[in-house]
Amino acid sequence: MSQQLKSKQTELLSAPELDRLITGDLDYRPVPFETADERALPVWRVRFLLTANKEEQFGLEINDEIHLGRGKNESGLVDLSPYGAESLGVSRHHVSLRPTSANLFVIDLGSTNGTRRNGRSIGINTPYALADGDILSLGNLQLTVNIVKRPYLQTAPLKQRVDLVDALAQIGKAITSQLNLDEVLNQVVATAMSLTAAGETSIWLVDEATGELFLEARRGIDDANLLRTRMPINEDTPAGRVIKTGKAIRMSSQPGEAQQIMTGYLVQALAYVPISLGGITFGVLASAHRDPGKSFDDHDERLLGAIADYAAIAIQNARLYRDTDLALNERVRELAALNELSRTVSASLDMNEVYRVLVQEIRRHMPVAGVHLYLRDETQPVLRAFSDTAPLAEYPIRHGILGRVVMSGEPVITNNFTSHPDYDEDLDLLVSDEPVPLAAVPLKVKSEVVGVLVLHNQPGGAPRSVLV
């Protein structure tokens, strides 16, 4: 049944919300092969829920590459026509889903109306790894992705010992193929649980701001309230000792006894290994057995150590990618502001309108307390305030901070304008008697300074960089 979307806004679902939605039975259709040998092909069991009407859903057991689109009786094509695909702009072969042992990739096949993952457009023929809870938009058809089962390196039964060399290759491929930090962490804990048959696994990272340990990812721990738990680093806890010493810890309880760990559960055995890079331990990979008689041995510790080593690299890469992505988004916003200002300047001869847009865009993208514009007088050696809100109506050139900007053609950016060598106490009390961060930027036309833009913060703030 076709259903038009009420909203195109992306809505990410939390784990508890997904759990409430996916209760009940659902048949999972194996595609593209009716049966699959899981030892030869990775099998992903995925539930797709229509975001506009989550009562409508379908399940797939994906055992090789398939296409999502429109059309019947085509091998390897999942027909989305029953969900309003045609009216919602889904192409006949819109995207490909390509399973590997580590990831389920989505690839746009050159669709007419594009594909978005969590609200962000993905490029044509570029693979993106899907994660549990993702919103996949094919044109205007939005599907919530619920990954029910994934391979997670289970190429050998858990009762068999995993060859360390083979495991290292699998671990590296699985973990370092991620760039999203949450996906990296979830892959790490799932891999650790799979290879050691642990009852629970978790990752604790050091908060650079507070110096505390906080729980970033977990597997086998049902209490959602534990997520983002924080605790001080001290040697009274196993994790604290691992952080302090950079060495792994294994512990086992005596028969009939159990010990409590950081998540509050009683366990029979635990193994904590450091997550380190460049000689600095910044996290802990923790595994625990709850069943009596189980323990971790040297082989398990080596596996966990290898996972932690790969995890350290992957976490660092994901953090760099995240920071680069944030910086790129900030740059895009700045360019959008410049484009808006350029459009207004080009389309209007009204200086008041240009000034209004200038102040609006600056305040939107820079948390400044004040914006003032001074223009150079063509007949006298002074700057004149364009707005009557400026501290001074007239500012003589060759004096003070603004005079320095006009004469040098270079901006002045300072955290304390009163300590600047060109500060003039009669002219530069731009805000108050207190030291205030300030940026004064020259406005140029054909290399000639025609004015000065002045930005200032409240006392205790810091000036933002500005485009000149």
Image: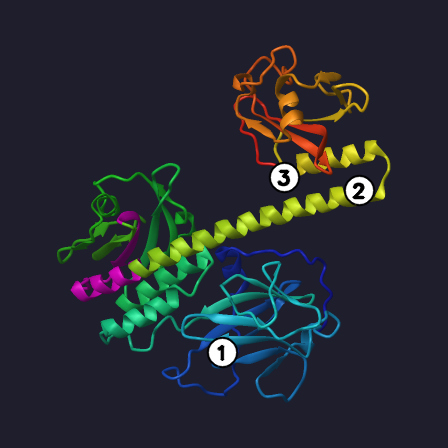
**Foreground tag (2 vs 1):** 2
* Pointer 1 local density, CA inside 10 Å: few below 14, some 14–19, many at least 20: many
Q: Is residue 143 magenta?
A: no
- In front: 442, or 360? 442
**Foreground tag (3 vs 1):** 3
**Where is mark 2, residue-wise?**
344
The image quadrant where one finds the N terminus is bottom right
The amino acid sitting under disc 2 is Thr
Q: Residue 426: where, in percent of width, then height? A: 64, 10
The amino acid sitting under disc 3 is Leu
Answer whether residue 440 is visible to the viewer in this image.
yes
Disc on the earlier residue, 3 or 2: 2
The disc at residue 61 is 1
Answer whether residue 369 is visible to the viewer in this image.
no
**Callout 3 touching callout 1 (CB < 8 Å):** no
The residue depicted at 21 percent of the width and 63 percent of the height is 302
Q: CA distance from mark 3 to mark 1?
A: 52 Å
Which image quarter: residue 438? top right
The image quadrant where one finds the C terminus is top right
The residue depicted at 61 percent of the width and 30 percent of the height is 411
**Where is mark 3, residue-wise?**
467
The amino acid sitting under disc 1 is Glu
* Pointer 2 local density, CA inside 10 Å: few below 14, some 14–19, many at least 20: some
Looking at the picture, does residue 365 appear above or below residue 162?
Answer: above
Magenta highlight range:
279-308
Left or right of 145? Residue 302 is: left
Q: CA distance from mark 3 to mark 2?
A: 18 Å
Q: Residue furthest left?
A: 254
Q: Secondary structure at mark 3?
A: loop
Q: Is residue 286 magenta?
A: yes
Q: Residue 236: where, in percent of width, then height? A: 21, 40
Q: Secondary structure at mark 1?
A: strand
